[in-house]
Each structure stands twice: as structure tokens, then as C-alpha cells.
Amino acid sequence: MALAQTISNNIFGRLSSDFKKKNFSLYGQWIGLLTVLLCLALGIANIFHASLVIIFSIICIVQGLIVVFVEIPFLLKICPLTDKFTNFIRNFDDNLPRCGFYLLMSVIQWLSLTLQVTSLIVVAIFFLFASSCYALAYFKNQEYLKSSLQTTDDSVQGQVGEHIVRNVL
């Protein structure tokens, strides 16, 4: 119980500190993290349709997994991934590339509406919100900032990553 409360206080404390900075790239990151949850939940929920919506629900689940690596780059260090995939994900370390990335993800989910209107429209809207936040950050000349959830302490983060890699090897 105390651990859950500590974790929630930590997350909500960092969320409030990010919103006080008034940087749209931070808003885009938080919306992106929320979109991951929506992708997984709604992708799984829509996989039970008896139509071609199944294809878009599988795409939605994959999109959610890709966004996890885009928004939480620490996972690139601890998960065994190909260099090609890691380099692809690292291309999105600025506002404009992330705006395009989320816009493309949104368009893919909007195309699912051509088959049948489902709850995947929520995912498309949230991808569009994230893209809009990154676009606003770019046009307002705001620098790309990482969320305080990601930038805890680089020395501690490095030690944790090294420890995990050592255990795996």
C-alpha cells in the first residue's frame, strides 16, 4: 500500500512539475504515454470484431508498443532490439519528427473508420492531440524537453541499466 502511494505521488508530482513548465513537447509526451494505454486496451477490445477491423486493432497494438520505445528511450538500452530498430526510434528526438510520427499514426487509425466506426477513433484522436502538441512546440520554437519522469538521475539510470544488462548476460 505504501509503495503504491509512493509511486503515485512520484508520478503525479512529476506530472504537475512538467505542466508548470508550459512546454508543449512535454504535453505531447504525456499524451503519448496515455495513448500507449489506449492502444493496448482498445486494440485488444477491437480484435474480437468479425470484420477487417481486426487488422487495424492489431496495427493499433503494434503502434502502442512502438510508442512505448519512442516515449521511454530508456527501454532501448535494456531491451534486446536490433540496431536498425533502435536507430529508427532515435530519429524521433525532436519536435518536428515526433509531430510527423504521431500524425502518421493518427492517419492510420483514421483509415480504420473506412471499414467500421469503432472505439479506435479514440486512439486516432489522441494520436492527433499528441501530434498537435509537438507541432505547437515546434512552431512556438520551444526546445524539445524530456519529461521529468524520464530524466530522473542519469547516473542512477546508467547504474540500473548496467546492473540489468549484467544480470541478463
Image (cartoon, rainbow, N blue to C red):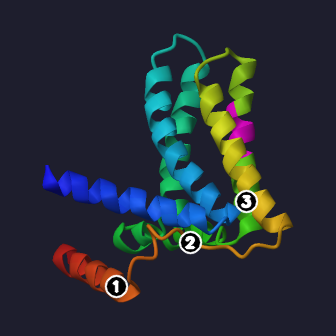
State whether residue 162 is above or below residue 13.
below
Please give the label number shown on residue 70: none
Q: Is residue 20 left or right of residue 131?
A: left
- Rendered location of residue 24, percent (x, y): 69, 61
State whether residue 17 is above or below residue 109.
below
Residue 106 covered by magenta stretch: yes
Mark 3 or 2 closer to N-term?
Answer: 3
Mark 2 or 1 closer to N-term?
Answer: 2
Q: Is residue 43 left or right of residue 88?
A: left
Q: Which residues are magenta?
A: 104-109
Q: Is residue 7 left or right of residue 64?
A: left
Work out whether residue 38 or residue 110 is closer to the camera in this orientation and state it. 38
Please give the label number shown on residue 146: 2
- Rendered location of residue 77, percent (x, y): 40, 75
Q: Give the class, few, some or many, for how many residues have Cα within 10 Å of label 1's Cα (few <14, many ≥20).
A: few
Q: CA distance from mark 3 to mark 2?
A: 12 Å
Tag 3 near tag 1, CB within 8 Å: no
Q: Helix, strand, or loop for circle 3?
A: helix
Res. 94 image quadrant: bottom right
Res. 122 image quadrant: top right
Residue 74 covered by magenta stretch: no
Mark 3 or 1 closer to N-term?
Answer: 3
User: In this figure, which residue is indicated by the disc labeled 1?
Assistant: 158
